[in-house]
């Protein structure tokens, strides 16, 4: 025995079929958008540290070179965090009675490290070597942004595979002289002088596109 549906019921049934088919696609699209959003990539969220450290003051006002605190960046995969001894070289004399720096003094006299929190963190299956990048002419600001303008450092780059590959496919536009690696304000000369400089750097530093999977996944 056949059952006839009213016109309204027919339309509702068709709508239900369309929604049922569209839901998986909508869910997938939402997921793809989410993982690329600041919520998914952890971008633009200042990371609270165990000791308040204002990069605007240290990098901007005092012009402290990135490599003073991140001393391993030119010779190691990791840039390294400042030790208590590094901080106390200045703060044994400057602000040595500050209440905000009591955790630093306590760590120093107890001979224990400061538990700094990593801001830019890649998945465990991604290999990244700071030293190869800075020694090939990629400045700190390319990945970390203008930390001299940040009270608390936040992740500014997406750090997605697509973002990395954009540079790896054509690294030349991102190059700068090695003596300007840590500069927050260096600008390439306008073209054609800038293009000539970057091409010369690529030749001198032996810079080539790197897109093989094993470059980052080992």
Image (tube, rainbow, N blue to C red):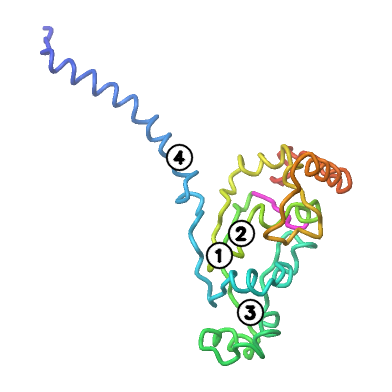
Cα–Cα gap, marks 4 and 1: 27 Å
Query: Residue 146: which numbered mark, if any?
Result: 2
Could you tell me if the residues under marks 3 and 2 are in contact, i.e. CB atoms within 8 Å? Answer: no
Q: Residue at x 89, y 47 (%)?
A: 204
Q: Residues within 10 Å of mark 4 (few under 14, many from 20)?
A: few
Q: Within the magenta stretch, is there residue 143?
A: no
Q: Which residue is mark 4?
A: 33
Cα–Cα gap, marks 1 and 3: 24 Å
**Which circle, 3 or 4, is nearer the viewer?**
4
Q: Which residue is mark 1?
A: 150
Q: The magenta stretch spans which residues? A: 126-131
Q: Which residue extends farthest top?
A: 1
Q: Residue at x 58, y 74 (%)?
A: 115
Q: Is residue 44 left or right of residue 112?
A: left
Asked which secondary structure carries label 1, the reply is loop
Q: Residues within 10 Å of mark 3 (few under 14, many from 20)?
A: some
């Amino acid at each position: 025995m056949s059952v006839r549906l009213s016109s309204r019921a027919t339309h509702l049934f068709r709508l239900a079929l369309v929604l049922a088919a569209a839901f998986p696609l909508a869910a997938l699209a939402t997921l793809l958008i989410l993982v690329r959003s600041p919520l998914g990539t952890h971008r633009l969220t200042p990371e609270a540290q165990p000791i308040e450290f204002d990069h605007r003051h240290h990098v901007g006002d005092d012009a402290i070179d990135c490599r003073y605190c991140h001393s391993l960046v030119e010779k190691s995969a990791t840039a390294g965090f400042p030790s208590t001894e590094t901080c106390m070289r200045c703060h044994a004399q400057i602000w040595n009675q500050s209440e905000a720096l009591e955790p630093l003094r306590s760590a120093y006299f107890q001979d224990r490290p400061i538990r700094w929190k990593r801001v830019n963190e890649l998945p465990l299956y991604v290999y990244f070597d700071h030293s190869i990048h800075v020694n090939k002419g990629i400045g700190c600001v390319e990945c970390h942004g203008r930390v001299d303008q940040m009270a608390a450092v936040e992740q500014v780059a997406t750090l997605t595979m697509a973002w990395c590959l954009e540079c790896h496919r054509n690294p030349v536009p991102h190059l700068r002289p090695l003596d300007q690696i840590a500069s927050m304000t260096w600008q390439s000369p306008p073209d054609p002088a800038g293009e000539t400089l970057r091409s010369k750097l690529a030749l001198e530093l032996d810079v080539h596109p790197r897109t093989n999977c094993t470059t980052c996944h080992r």
